[in-house]
Image (cartoon, grey):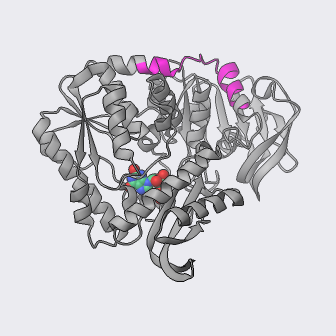
């Protein structure tokens, strides 16, 4: 399979570069910027891309690639910081400029290869402090903006290109076309990365493993697709277990059970452990403590199942590519702000090896596979749901009354978004509830009821998020339905904090 390798210099968009390339069926992989020349060669890439990054090429701790990579005689594209690295390496000059953030008009000066068929000018997304002041003499300017005279440069002879803007973000018009030009016209990579091909290879690989596989399924798309791929390869040697922790969405347990038993025919055991979980959560108010309890209880239930139904040799997980690769450049504290809970931490004596059939894939690719494996659309379009479930959407102690409110109110939010054709357009949408009460008037009577918080956000990867500007009429309808249909609720609020500084979940 032909491959493009992207060196990650720490830009928030690095993964997007790979995703965009894979969208036109060429396999792209992200590697840390400091990969050695020898390691890079093992990938046998058709071309290399340097991502953007927050550094300045002149700072003492600027991340630098292995110098030998420049001698590989392979097509090379530098984006933003990567562009500046190329300018610097070949003898040009980079200077501190006024920070430019947002969209600029890029005028195309040379419409051969990289910028071919994109038109005379396009809006291009800029996000940089430094810029190229003087370009190396083997290079020519192929595009400029009003403030950056060397916004795109090329050495066609060397097949090296640098662009100051970000072609990978949707705000750059024809951005995908520019990446496509590099990958298909310059690198001449074959478009041989398809999900049909992936399924075939994955099934073939998995069918070679010995022993039984244990897979915890949550009803989410990742664990479902992982289970189905494995099932395709080894049939009933895969045993799936689904733990109902009492913190699920309305009717979720029944829907998941039906899907696995009736649609997929996999070996599936549902365990109703709601009482155990809710018992352990009694009187617990601290958010981290709640997460810890859910995580630990999950491991208890899971271990018990493994003991009674084993022996198992493998533990399957739906880990995706963005969870696997780290840039080598510090990503800051975001990743550890909350103790995310997955099926980690199982006891060593179970002796399980980890099987992660999706570890090369992005979410949209998993969705494509789900479609090919006949997973009902309802499931793979469903929003992400946190492992500790409603425990993180209920502020304070988890009580039956608050669970009921969160479940029914969230269902109303989801249904109304579906009805308005907005469900698929937002990242997540739910209702949270705490202990605060507000006064309402029912009939002639003043009554204190719960306050429900609606949270609807847009995001591309959950690292950052913005609140969705829902139409007021829709918010009004949601609010009316919640206060009419849930007796204990008097107020409905809409959460308008973005991430950062807020997070998507309230706890
Ligand atoms: P935050 O609240 O950190 O959430 O902005 C980012 C994304 O992660 C989900 N989330 C979790 N997912 N286990 C999970 O599997 C967890 O403990 C967890 N906490 C948050 C959240 O729903 C959002 O999509």
Q: Nearer the viewer, residue 244 or 144?
A: 244
Please, is residue 62 above or below residue 211 in the view? below
Q: Nearer the viewer, residue 37 or 45?
A: 45
Q: Is residue 193 magenta?
A: yes
Where residue 277 sits, quadrant-wise, is: bottom left
Query: In the image, residue 502 lies at what x, y percent?
Result: 54, 65
Q: Nearer the viewer, residue 308 or 443?
A: 443
Residue at x 57%, y 60% (from the top left corner)? 481
Tell whether 215 sits left or right of 368: left
Query: In the image, residue 224 lies at what x, y percent?
Result: 37, 34
Instruction: Say whether residue 159 is visible.
Output: no
Total labels: the figure holds 0
Q: Nearer the viewer, residue 425 or 132?
A: 425
Where residue 309 sits, quadrant-wise, is: top left
Where residue 186 sits, quadrant-wise, is: top right
Please, is residue 498 above or below residue 459 in the view? below
Tell whether 274 sits left or right of 365: left
Query: In the image, residue 307 lies at what x, y percent?
Result: 11, 41
Residue at x 40%, y 18% (from the top left corner)? 201
Tell whether 222 sits left or right of 154: left
Residue at x 47%, y 68% (from the top left corner)? 487
Q: Quadrant of the C terminus?
A: bottom left
Q: Magenta residues, as a range? A: 178-199
Please, is residue 394 above or below residue 79 in the view? below
Q: Is residue 438 magenta?
A: no
Helix, strand or loop: magenta stretch: helix
Ligand 1 resides in the quarter of the picture at: bottom left
Seen as rendered, the residue at the extreme front is 443
Residue at x 35%, y 19% (from the top left corner)? 203
């Amino acid at each position: 399979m032909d491959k493009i390798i992207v060196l990650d210099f720490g830009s928030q968009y690095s993964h997007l570069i790979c995703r965009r390339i894979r969208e036109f069926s060429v396999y792209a992989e992200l590697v840390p910027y400091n990969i050695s020349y020898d390691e890079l060669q093992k990938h046998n890439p058709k071309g290399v891309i340097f991502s953007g990054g927050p550094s300045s090429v002149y700072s003492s701790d600027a991340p630098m690639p292995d110098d030998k990579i420049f001698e590989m005689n392979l097509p090379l594209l530098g984006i933003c910081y990567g562009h500046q690295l190329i300018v610097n390496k070949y003898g040009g000059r980079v200077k501190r400029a006024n920070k430019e953030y947002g969209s600029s008009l890029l005028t195309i000066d040379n419409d051969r290869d990289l910028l071919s068929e994109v038109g005379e000018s396009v809006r291009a997304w800029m996000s940089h402090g430094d810029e190229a002041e003087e370009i190396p003499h083997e290079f020519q300017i192929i595009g400029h903006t009003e403030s950056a005279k060397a916004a795109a440069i090329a050495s066609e002879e060397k097949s090296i290109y640098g662009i100051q803007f970000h072609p990978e973000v949707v705000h750059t018009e024809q951005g995908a076309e520019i990446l496509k030009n590099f990958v298909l016209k310059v690198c001449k990579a074959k478009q041989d990365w398809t999900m049909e091909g992936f399924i075939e290879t994955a099934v073939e690989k998995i069918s070679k493993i010995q022993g039984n596989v244990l897979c915890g399924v949550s009803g989410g798309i990742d664990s479902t697709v992982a289970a189905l791929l494995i099932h395709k390869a080894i049939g009933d040697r895969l045993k799936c277990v689904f733990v109902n922790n009492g913190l699920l969405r309305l009717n979720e347990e029944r829907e998941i059970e039906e899907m696995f038993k009736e649609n997929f025919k996999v070996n599936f055991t549902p365990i109703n452990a709601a009482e155990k979980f809710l018992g352990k959560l009694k009187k617990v108010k601290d958010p981290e403590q709640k997460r810890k309890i859910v995580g630990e209880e999950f491991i208890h239930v899971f271990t018990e199942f493994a003991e009674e139904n084993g022996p198992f040799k493998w533990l399957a997980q739906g880990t995706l590519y963005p969870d696997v690769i780290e840039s080598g450049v510090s990503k800051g504290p975001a990743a550890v702000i909350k103790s995310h809970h997955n099926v980690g931490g199982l006891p060593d004596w179970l002796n399980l090896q980890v099987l992660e059939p999706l570890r090369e894939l992005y979410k949209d690719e998993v969705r494509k596979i789900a479609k090919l494996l006949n997973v009902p659309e309802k499931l793979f379009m469903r929003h992400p749901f946190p492992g500790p479930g409603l425990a993180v959407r209920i502020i304070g102690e988890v009580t039956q009354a608050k669970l009921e409110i969160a479940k029914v109110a969230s269902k109303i939010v989801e249904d109304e978004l579906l009805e308005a054709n907005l469900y698929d357009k937002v990242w997540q949408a739910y209702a949270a509830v705490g202990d605060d009460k507000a006064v309402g008037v029912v009939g002639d009577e003043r009554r204190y009821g719960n306050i429900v918080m609606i949270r609807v956000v847009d995001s591309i990867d959950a690292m950052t998020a913005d609140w969705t500007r829902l139409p007021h009429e829709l918010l009004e309808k949601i609010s009316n339905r919640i206060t009419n249909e849930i007796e204990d609720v008097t107020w409905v609020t809409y959460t308008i904090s973005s991430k950062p500084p807020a997070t998507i979940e309230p706890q």
